[in-house]
Image (spheres, helix red, strand yellow):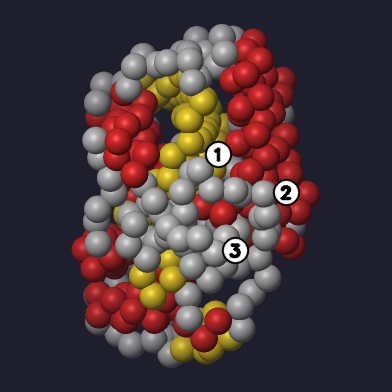
Amino acid sequence: MKYLITGSAGFIGYHLSRRFCEEGIEVTGVDNVNSYYDLKLKEDRLDNLKKYKNFKFIKSDLADKEELIKIFEKENIENVINLAAQPGVRYSITNPDVSIRSNINAFFNLLECCKDFKVKSLIYASSSSVYGNNQKVPSSVKDNVDHPVSLYAATKKANELMAYTYFHLYNIPMTGLRFFTVYGPWGRPDMAYYKFALNIMNGNPIDVYNNGDMERDFTYIDDVIESIYRLAKKDIVNDYKLFNIGGEHPVNLLYFIETLEKALGKKAEKIFKEMQPGDVKKTFADSSELAAYTGYKPGTRIEEGIGLFVKWFKQYYNYK
């Protein structure tokens, strides 16, 4: 099969493209390679992918509909995995126009191409942020998600609704993935664990929000990729599905920092701050639907995952 993987220069998109190439699957990767974070990191990911003969990269912005149509016309795409988006809860509050363009307009263009070129399936990234401040935990895909607390969360909820509409109208199989705090090697420098590591190693303080009284259901990147791979390999059926991709083991922020300090071999200077707008106190995935459907559930514990991240991190940045 031939896959279009959007966001292939990004964190999850890079790892998934590599896994598919290693499995002998033909991949066309698309990314606009924007400057939201370190361009060198994105370029290094792409350099690794370009070593595979069954990987083709096209630099393009999904928000440019004419360019996207040209890609579909030339590449004979059979299946699509959409991982391209403008990430960042806080960024969406300060830069709402960018979030709408990248997460709504671009996704609409992709849905239109999936319809017009009759793709077999679309798997797309949603987010645990759609659960907002729901009091019920763990979060289930059956829960109400009508109260997002950030524009980023609202765009992801909108993606789910748009995808359902295109499934209903045009019978395109749709699978939405609600990711829970994905971390690991080649990650995103805007995420807390990565920022913490950089600041700790460079002798700078770290900001700890809500005085550390927060919990996150961290999900190691390899577990995420295995989950997506198994979903992609399932027989395509005319259905609309949603899955949580999470480890079902929320970790307290202060324990997480302590784990990172041990792996880095260096203590953090902490600055305690209040909760930021758009943030949530706790995320906790119920991944039972994923396990029932694929026979797999993310299981890497934070101690192991952080150790693997730090090993890569020190090597990549030449820290002794």
**Relative to 246, residue 103 above or below:** above
Q: In the rendered view of the protein, which quadrant contains the N terminus?
A: top left
Residue count near mark 2 (Cα–Cα under 10 Å), binned few <14, some 14–19, many ≥20? some
The front one of 242 and 156 is 242
- Could you tell which of marks 3 and 2 lies nearer the N-terminus? 2
Q: Helix, strand, or loop for circle 3?
A: loop
Residue count near mark 3 (Cα–Cα under 10 Å), binned few <14, some 14–19, many ≥20? some
Q: Quadrant of residue 56?
A: top left
Would residue 273 be seen by someone viewing this image from the given angle?
yes
Three-letter code, disc 3 = Asn
Residue 13: give x, y in percent of width and height: 44, 39
| Residue that label 2 marks | 98
**Relative to 30, residue 186 above or below:** below
Alpha carbon separation for disc pair 2 and 1: 13 Å
| Residue that label 1 marks | 84
Three-letter code, disc 2 = Val
Alpha carbon separation for disc pair 3 and 2: 24 Å
The front one of 253 and 192 is 253
Three-letter code, disc 1 = Ala
Left or right of residue 197: residue 319: left
Residue at x 43%, y 58% (from the top left corner): 138
Q: Helix, strand, or loop for circle 2?
A: helix
